């Protein structure tokens, strides 16, 4: 990006508060003099009578560097009056179409550069043709499925996006589908900071990966907070359907320990609930899940609450009726996104901030995110 151009933040309805927070942080930096005040009404998104999406940019974006913050929560019917979270639904399909139309509108309005910020990016779980168990034939087979990750990547790039910023992608190799800069931010430092706020020593906790796929991130978190690590081995019967049997591979006794399960997504809640059953069979004390993206489909919130699970998550996806779930704690990611934008606009190093916990804490002392 050419940092002599004015910088503008745009946000959809569900991202206005986050964008306002990000602007407040960035506006205090002396070397962000090109930052334009945030206008919460700059993007208009609505539905025609047949539910096709109508997008309009209400501000002048000519020759500006534009950062578009797009939520996976959106409206599904014609907008009449002010939109609140109660009027929105989790809509990954609408989100991707809306974002492509926003990018196209910005290109046609002569924006100089366009960066898409997706706190949660849908269509990450199909990065290859999957191998699944066919219950009718009772055998494993390779599916004839779409590689939807690649399809979405090409759509966004073709619509005009010149940079992608997202949080905790389901597969790290997703950036290989993009020919543009792809910044993958990670929540690990946020969860490490959260654990440090609760414990002076980590003698009675254990970080647990609910499956082998989550082991790498769980290991990074365990190293950051100097805590033991465990991995649950279990059989996956089908996508989202796991066997309740399994064992925990760890070097410590889990009896009466405070357990922290680390994973990127909670959708229906089945993985977490089955993991908690296995952990309780091993004598675990309190169980908390540290999750990046709270999709929480259907009655997942109720199931997690009934299972006596605590949930620490990020505001990558809004949570409706949060006040009814005291077991859910939400960590604000706006400071990390603000730091990512700041690093991009001032040519500063970014990646080590999220993987070097010592450096992260040093930057916090210097005023990072404030």
Image (cartoon, grey):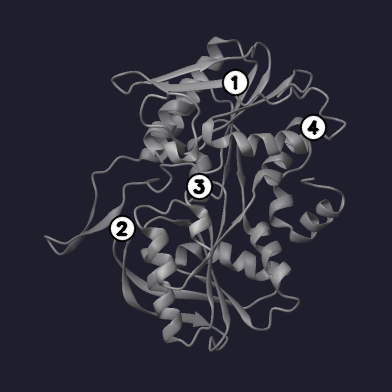
Q: CA distance from mark 3 to mark 4?
A: 34 Å
In the rendered image, residue 66, in percent from the top left (x then y), is placed at 64, 23
Say if residue 80 shows up in the picture: yes
Which residue is painted at 77% across and 55% down in the image? 360
Q: Which residue is denoted by mark 1 in the rendering?
A: 42
Residue denoted by label 3: 173
Query: Residue pushed farthest left?
Result: 136
Q: Nearer the N terminus, badge 2 or badge 4?
A: 4
Closer to the eye: label 3 or 2:
2
- N-terminal of the two: label 1 or label 4? 4
- Read off the residue under disc 4: 27
Going by the image, does 343 lie left or right of 301? right
For this rendering, which residue is in front, 257 or 207? 257
Tag count? 4
Q: Give whichever of discs 3 and 2 has the lower sequence position.
A: 3
Residue shown at 67% from the left, 68% from the top: 195
Tell me which label, 3 or 1, sits earlier in the chain: 1
Compare marks 1 and 2 and give the one earlier in the sequence: 1
Q: Earlier in the sequence, mark 3 or mark 4?
A: 4
- The residue to which callout 2 is attached is 239
Disc 3 and disc 2: Cα gap in Å? Answer: 20 Å
Quarter holding the C terminus? top right
């Amino acid at each position: 990006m050419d940092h002599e151009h004015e910088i503008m933040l745009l946000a959809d309805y569900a991202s206005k508060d986050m964008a306002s927070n990000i602007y407040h942080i960035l506006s205090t930096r002396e070397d962000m003099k090109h930052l334009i005040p945030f206008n919460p009404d700059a993007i208009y998104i609505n539905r025609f009578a047949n539910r096709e999406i109508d997008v309009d940019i209400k501000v002048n974006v000519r020759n500006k560097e534009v950062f578009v913050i797009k939520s996976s929560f959106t409206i599904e019917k014609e907008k009449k009056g002010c939109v609140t979270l109660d009027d929105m639904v989790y809509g990954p399909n609408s989100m991707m179409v809306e974002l492509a139309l926003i990018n196209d509108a910005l290109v046609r309005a002569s924006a100089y550069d366009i960066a898409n910020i997706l706190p949660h990016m849908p269509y990450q779980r199909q990065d290859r043709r999957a191998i699944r168990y066919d219950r009718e034939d009772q055998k494993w087979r390779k599916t004839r499925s779409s590689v939807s990750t690649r399809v979405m990547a090409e759509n966004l790039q073709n619509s005009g996006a010149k940079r992608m910023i997202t949080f905790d992608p389901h597969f790290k190799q997703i950036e290989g589908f993009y020919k543009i800069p792809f910044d993958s931010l990670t929540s690990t430092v946020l969860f490490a900071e959260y654990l440090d706020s609760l414990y002076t020593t980590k003698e009675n906790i254990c970080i647990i990966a609910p499956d082998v796929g989550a082991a790498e991130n769980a290991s990074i978190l365990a190293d950051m907070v100097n805590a033991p690590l465990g991995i649950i081995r279990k059989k996956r019967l089908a996508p989202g359907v796991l066997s309740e049997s399994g064992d925990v591979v760890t070097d410590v006794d889990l009896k009466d320990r405070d357990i922290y399960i680390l994973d990127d997504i909670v959708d229906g809640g089945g993985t977490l609930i089955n993991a908690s059953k296995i952990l309780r069979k091993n004598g675990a004390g309190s169980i908390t899940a540290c999750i990046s993206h709270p999709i929480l489909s259907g009655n997942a919130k109720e199931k997690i609450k009934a299972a006596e699970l605590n949930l620490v998550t990020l505001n990558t996806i809004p949570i409706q009726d949060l006040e009814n779930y005291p077991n859910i704690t939400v960590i604000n990611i706006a400071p990390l996104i603000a730091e990512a934008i700041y690093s991009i606009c001032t040519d500063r190093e970014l990646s080590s901030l999220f993987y070097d916990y010592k450096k992260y804490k040093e930057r916090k002392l210097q005023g990072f995110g404030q």
